[in-house]
Every structure is written in C-alpha cells, then in structure tokens.
Amino acid sequence: MKKQELKVAVFTAQQRDMRVIGIVLTHLKSAKYAFSMAERTGEAPIDIALVDDSDPDMRKRLASAVARHPNLAVVHLVSEAGRAGERCELLSSQLMMQLLPTLERLLQRIAEQPPAAPAPARIESTVTALPPTPAKLRALVVDDSQTVRTQLANVMSNIGMACDIADGAKAALAQLANRQYDLIYVDVMMPDMDGYTLTREIKRDRSNKAPVIILTSQSSPFDRARGALAGCDIFLTKPVGLKQFYAATTKALRKSMAVDDLSGWITDPTQAKARAHA
C-alpha cells in the first residue's frame, strides 16, 4: 500500500530542534505516512506545522500559514507539559523519541473527526505571508594565529555565519561549555593542546553535535589518519581555497542538519563575488 505523503513545516529558531526534526523525518519510517520537510513561508503546500510555543515571532509566522491553510494540523513544541485542552503538544526534550508517534496520533485523531462545515470565503489579498528569517548559524574557530583567526572570521562573515574565536584549546573548551555551535574549525599545532587531542575532547561530549573540521598545514597520510582517529568530520590542508572551504563547510552542515538546501542559511561567497564583478 502506497504511503500518504505529507509535508511538515517547522516554525522554530532553535538549531538543535531543526536538526533533530530533520533527522527523524529523514531516517525514521512510519507505517502509514511518508513525511518530508516543507518551506515555512505559508505559500507552498503544508499538511502539518510544528511551532515553538515560546517564540512569539514563530507563532506569528504560523498564524500567517494557518490563514493560507485553514485545515493545517499543528503540533506545539513546549518545554513542559501544559493543560492545553484539545491541542497537540510535544515536549522539545522528547523530539527524537516521540515526534513520529505524536504525528501519527494527531493524524489518526483528525481522521476520526466528522467532516467540518465548509469554511467561509476568504479574501486572499488581505493575507500577508511573512518571509522566513532563520537564525544565523554560528561557528567556533580555534587557532593560535591571530592572522588565521582574522581571515577565517572574515570568511565566515562572507558566508553569512556568526563566528566566535579561541586562541587555543583551553579557551575553546571553555566556550564550548557555555554555548552550542553548529560547526567547529580546529588548528592542529597549538601550544596548550594539539588539535587532535582537542577534537577527541569535543567528540567525547555527547551533548555537542557540531561537526569538527581540522585545518592544518600537515598533509601526510599519517596526519589524515590521526585526524580520522580523533573523530574529525573533514580534514583540510592549508592553504585552503575559498571554493574548497565553502564546499567543506556545506558538506559538514548538510550532514549534521540533515538538510540538502542550505540557501536560507549560508551564502556561496564565490557566487557573490561573481555577481559583484558582473
């Protein structure tokens, strides 16, 4: 039996939740339904919406989508269970385990409801869809060279990512204890701790899901093997061209975020440069 295909739009600025939802919808299978991510502009077809109840801006965007899709099924992402009557709630902390069962229960409940009366005619011109504004992705650059840190910070700005810098491994670990990052760039040769050891420390923390890209002038097969054993996601040899750097960044983000289209998150600096000289 062919599965019913349903589009799910996610109204949240929380990067972790976006990644988890993408992973669940991509890799976990339902017996009755085939779920896929949809744009949250409200213009494209949407069957189900997930909304972060704590974010007023996301609730506003959802209202715009509901205006275009009155029969839109909604799951409210909450930090703690409430008393919301008939609405469907899901704890953000249980996304990985409970997202798929929650969607299936919601659809079953809708299927069992009697048909609703036809909705009154709407004037489409009075509805304004707000454009999506995804939160900036944030990278951590770890390098003891001020020159390299400045260069990478400039590249991050051109790509459209926010960037924090650390001048060594200890400073990086301190920042990682207080903030989640979407991507981490690590130099190998540092005075307080080498990049391989730092990468192992980062990967040992299971709460940290950010990919690690090692940037080093060491290019031997032995060095690449050490990087792989440390757990790095991508190994790049300096000097790195802009095109190669962007490709590696895109590859790492696509894998960690479980999405193919990153056009709303980062910008290809080579295309921007070409347009500027056109």
Image: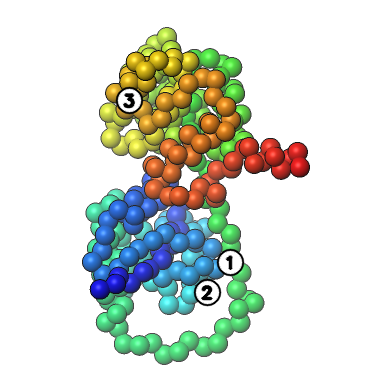
Q: Earlier in the sequence, mark 3 or mark 1?
A: 1
Q: Nearer the viewer, mark 3 or mark 1?
A: 3
Toward the top, the furthest residue is 191
Instruction: Name the quadrant of the C terminus.
Output: top right
The kind of residue tagged 1 is Ala
Circle 2 sits on which residue?
A: 68
Depth order, front residue of 78/72: 72
Instruction: Name the quadrant of the N terminus.
Output: bottom left
Q: Residues within 10 Å of mark 3 (few under 14, many from 20)?
A: some
Q: How is the image coloured?
A: rainbow
- Mark 3 lies on a secondary structure that is helix
Q: Position of residue 77 (x, y in %)?
A: 36, 58
Q: Is residue 35 above or below residue 257?
A: below
Q: Which residue is found at the position 47% from the left and 77% from the top?
A: 70
- Mark 1 lies on a secondary structure that is loop
Q: Which residue is found at the position 48% from the left and 21% from the top?
A: 237
Q: Is residue 161 left or right of residue 227?
A: right
Q: Position of residue 4 (x, y in %)?
A: 33, 72
Q: Is residue 129 left or right of residue 273?
A: left
Toward the front, the furthest residue is 221
Q: Is residue 43 above or below residue 270?
A: below
Q: Residues within 10 Å of mark 2 (few under 14, many from 20)?
A: many
Circle 1 sits on which residue?
A: 129
Q: Nearer the viewer, mark 3 or mark 2?
A: 3
The kind of residue tagged 3 is Ala
Q: Earlier in the sequence, mark 2 or mark 1?
A: 2
Q: CA distance from mark 2 to mark 1?
A: 8 Å
> Is label 3 in contact with label 1 (beta carbons under 8 Å)?
no
Q: Classify residue 198 by image quadrant.
A: top left
Q: CA distance from mark 3 to mark 2?
A: 48 Å
> Is label 2 in contact with label 1 (beta carbons under 8 Å)?
yes
Circle 3 sits on which residue?
A: 228
